Image (cartoon, grey):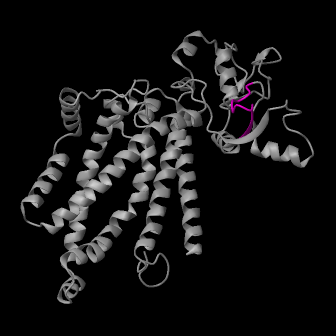
């Protein structure tokens, strides 16, 4: 088991790194103008643009002309694209591999904070490698810090370029993720309990009225566009129950503004859990060990809950950690529809605004949560059903 866990963790890390590298390479192939806001494109001179690209690690000062654009009295052939106009030259593009190395080198930074947890902007961050190197050499990387100030390591993905300008990507994701997780975990708990209970009831009442009603609900939810369902729920909730139609964390009773988004998130998941619970339980009911248990005199209730439900829940359990972890990603439709300031629409906004650092951070988050969710799902299956072996020559998962 330990060998399997280590192997899967190594595979997961490699896959996440590969995804991040691919996204990084693709984003760095875009024109350099995408690293500036609209105001900066209009106001910045060419020299100012090059200077910002140097700060971002996209370009380097030309080693031949040292930023002047001239070698002697002639235009520098290495950095001047148009020899007839050397203005704004003096910089050369850095290789993508060098930029990627900087990205991973700065993933862990040491920053200075005060006793209130607020970052001290006057102190520049130091990478983990530089910090450890200085400490091993007996040096204090930040010098003598004032009383109440301390340095601590933080995860760093750069700063947002356009969408949340000059804010750390990790801070943006944390703020949005908290809102999405709150709504997502509540809706997941509701849909799991309601969906499994109704799925069990359908399986026990197979081909009866309750089963037909549940099947009709499942078909309806999957056939009707979600936006139509969300509109009906929003209008009914507002007109009949007086619920707020938009999310508002500053409202006098912010809990009420979360009711409609939670209901809309739960509607589809309930149908999914009902469908698969019924399907797995009907499959189990037709197996020989269930017939044997009934012949031994066990009641239908004991057979249903001690044997059928336990075995039918194993396939559902595989995707439970995945579903829990992906609540951090939010829902694009629900959060956009109810103006929820969560993670759902954030990736779309970041791509449409060409906020490349934010795109990298969100892709890294999604890749990590998705792969980790599948890994934990496999482990959960072995805990529920000891017959499932993740390693070995027989019954290999």
Left or right side of 317 for 373: right
Q: Position of residue 304 (x, y in %)?
A: 23, 74
Task: Say above or below: 344 vs 43.
Answer: below
Residue 217 among those drawn in magenta: no
Left or right side of 41 for 285: left
Magenta span: helix, strand or loop, mainly?
Answer: loop
Q: Nearer the viewer, residue 130 or 142?
A: 142
Task: Say above or below: 16 vs 396.
Answer: above
What is the total number of numbered labels drawn onto the structure image? 0
Q: Residue furthest right?
A: 138
Q: Is residue 117 visible?
A: yes
Task: Say above or below: 386 vs 265.
Answer: below
Q: Position of residue 127 (x, y in %)?
A: 75, 41
Q: Is residue 275 visible?
A: no
Q: Position of residue 148 (x, y in %)?
A: 80, 32
Residue 117 among those drawn in magenta: yes
Per the rendered image, the range of residues in magenta is 109-121
Look at the image and tell me in which quarter the N terminus lies: bottom right
At horizontal 54% and vertical 59% (from top left) the residue drawn is 12
Q: Position of residue 371 (x, y in %)?
A: 48, 56
Task: Say above or below: 350 vs 372.
Answer: above
Left or right side of 55 for 379: left
At horizontal 43% and vertical 34% (from top left) the residue drawn is 342
Look at the image and tell me in which quarter the C terminus lies: bottom left
At horizontal 79% and vertical 32% (from top left) the residue drawn is 149
Residue 352 image-quadrant placement = top left
């Amino acid at each position: 088991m330990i060998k399997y866990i280590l192997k899967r963790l190594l595979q997961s890390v490699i896959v996440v790194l590969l995804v991040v590298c691919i996204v990084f390479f693709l984003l760095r192939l875009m024109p350099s103008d995408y690293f500036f806001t609209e105001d900066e494109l209009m106001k910045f001179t060419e020299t100012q643009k090059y200077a910002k690209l140097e700060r971002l690690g996209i370009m380097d000062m030309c080693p031949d002309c040292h930023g002047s654009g001239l070698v002697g009295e002639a235009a520098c052939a290495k950095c001047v694209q148009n020899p007839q106009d050397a203005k704004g030259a003096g910089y050369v593009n850095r290789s993508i591999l060098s930029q990627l190395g900087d990205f991973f080198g700065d993933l862990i930074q040491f920053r200075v904070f005060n006793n209130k947890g607020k970052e001290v902007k006057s102190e520049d961050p130091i990478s983990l490698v530089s910090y450890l190197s200085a400490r091993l050499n007996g040096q204090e990387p930040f010098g003598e810090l004032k009383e109440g100030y301390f340095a601590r390591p933080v995860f760093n993905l750069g700063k947002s370029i356009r969408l949340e300008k000059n804010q750390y990507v990790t801070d943006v994701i944390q703020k949005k993720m908290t809102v999405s997780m709150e709504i997502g975990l509540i809706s997941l708990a509701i849909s799991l309990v309601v969906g499994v209970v109704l799925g069990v009831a359908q399986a026990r009442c197979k081909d009866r009225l309750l089963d037909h009603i549940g099947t009709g609900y499942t078909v309806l939810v999957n056939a009707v566009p979600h936006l139509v369902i969300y509109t009906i729920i929003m209008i009914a909730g507002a007109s009949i129950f007086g619920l707020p139609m938009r999310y508002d964390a500053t409202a006098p009773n912010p809990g009420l503004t979360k009711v409609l988004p939670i209901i809309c998130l739960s509607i589809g998941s309930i149908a999914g859990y009902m469908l698969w619970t019924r399907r797995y339980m009907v499959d189990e009911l037709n197996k020989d060990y269930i017939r044997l248990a009934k012949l031994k005199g066990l009641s239908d209730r004991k057979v249903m809950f001690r044997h059928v439900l336990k075995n039918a829940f194993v396939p559902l359990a595989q995707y439970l950690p995945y579903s829990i972890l992906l609540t951090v990603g939010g829902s694009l439709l629900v959060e956009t529809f109810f103006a929820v300031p969560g993670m759902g629409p954030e990736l779309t906004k970041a791509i449409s605004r060409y906020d490349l650092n934010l795109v990298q951070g969100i892709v890294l988050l999604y890749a990590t949560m998705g792969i980790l969710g599948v890994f934990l799902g496999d482990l959960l299956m072995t805990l529920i059903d000891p017959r499932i072996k993740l390693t070995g020559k027989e019954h290999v998962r």
